[in-house]
């Protein structure tokens, strides 16, 4: 089995808000991949004493433990329990009902000898390479389907769209959000490899349109995860002045790629 993990902050002067992990149990039976992308809040009140990296570290740690050890739990159940555990760690000190409470997008995959299970929440991405070479993207596209006018201001997003019906959902403080995730199961024999990515890495396809999901997957498989992140950084830098592609987002985003050949 080949695994590879690269996670790089968008700004060397700010902490990386992503979390990534690969779990390979000692039994040798299966494994898991976990990627979280912490949501950078706008300047202002969040209702929480803790940083986004604190949140993603707690949530990611809980997900890793439960995904590896809780083989009797489904991935939505695991996400629900991990959110509840993380919320419990700061419910006494923070206002977890605040719309900007620390939160994250998520992509999880777990495999056994028989199956590959997957879960995606918000704009993280999971790519599955089938036995015939086809690359199947698993995406939660609710945020992408919203009209750009609806995303005009953070206040509007917080009030009407964030973790609301008709909007989009992230892993924050409500365990029930796990039911909103995109989930599924595939036969293990039908999946040769997979890649989980935060949207800072998927910019190569989704923002700069350098290639489709198959081209992105092939790039990671052949040249490595570092090559994809380096290419994204070059594209971001080239666009930093004209901002033809990055009209409404940060110039450089945290970028994480986890690749596993099963």
Image (tube, grey):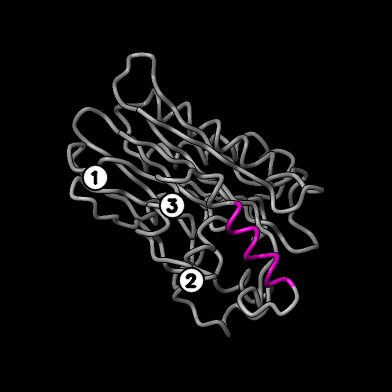
Residue indicated by mark 3: 219
Q: Is residue 106 left or right of residue 12?
A: left
Q: Position of residue 10 (x, y in %)?
A: 70, 53
Tell me the distance, in whole angstroms, between the alpha carbons under discs 3 and 1: 25 Å
Q: Is residue 58 magenta?
A: no
Q: Position of residue 18 (x, y in %)?
A: 61, 45
Residue 2 found in image quarter: top left
Q: Please, what secondary structure does the residue beneath circle 3 have?
A: helix
Above or below residue 70? Residue 50 is below
Q: Is residue 180 left or right of residue 105?
A: left
Above or below residue 142? Residue 76 is above
Q: Is residue 234 left or right of residue 69?
A: right
Q: What segment carries the magenta color?
A: 230-240
The dominant secondary structure in magenta is: helix
Above or below residue 237? Residue 224 is above
Q: Earlier in the sequence, mark 2 or mark 1?
A: 1
Residue indicated by mark 2: 209
Foreground tag (2 vs 3): 3
Residue indicated by mark 1: 185
Foreground tag (3 vs 1): 3
Q: Earlier in the sequence, mark 3 or mark 1?
A: 1
Residue occupying image coordinates x 32% and y 37%: 74
Q: Please, what secondary structure does the residue beneath circle 1 have?
A: strand
Tell me the distance, in whole angstroms, between the alpha carbons under discs 2 and 1: 29 Å
Q: Is residue 132 left or right of residue 59?
A: left
Q: Earlier in the sequence, mark 2 or mark 3?
A: 2
């Amino acid at each position: 089995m080949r695994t590879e993990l690269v996670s790089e902050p968008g700004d060397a002067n700010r902490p990386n808000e992503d979390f990534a992990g690969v779990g390979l149990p000692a039994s040798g039976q299966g494994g898991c991949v976990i990627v979280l992308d912490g949501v950078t809040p706008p300047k202002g009140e969040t209702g929480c004493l803790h940083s986004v990296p604190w949140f993603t570290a707690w949530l990611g740690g809980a997900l890793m433990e439960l995904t590896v050890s809780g083989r009797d739990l489904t991935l939505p159940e695991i996400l629900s329990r991990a959110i509840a555990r993380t919320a419990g760690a700061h419910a006494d000190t923070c206002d977890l009902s605040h719309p900007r409470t620390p939160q994250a997008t998520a992509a999880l995959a777990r495999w056994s000898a028989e199956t590959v299970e997957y879960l995606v929440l918000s704009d993280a991405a999971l790519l599955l390479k089938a036995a015939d070479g086809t690359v199947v993207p698993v995406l939660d596209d609710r945020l992408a389907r919203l009209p750009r006018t609806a995303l005009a201001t953070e206040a509007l997003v917080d009030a009407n769209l964030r973790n609301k019906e008709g909007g989009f959902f992230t892993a924050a403080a409500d365990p029930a959000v796990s039911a909103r995730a995109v989930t599924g199961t595939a036969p293990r024999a039908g999946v040769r490899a997979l890649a989980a990515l935060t949207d800072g890495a998927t910019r190569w396809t989704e923002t700069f349109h350098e290639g489709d999901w198959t081209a992105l997957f092939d790039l990671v498989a052949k040249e490595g995860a570092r090559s994809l992140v380096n290419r994204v950084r070059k594209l971001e830098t080239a666009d930093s002045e004209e901002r033809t592609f990055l009209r409404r987002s940060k110039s450089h985003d945290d970028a994480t790629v986890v690749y596993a050949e099963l």
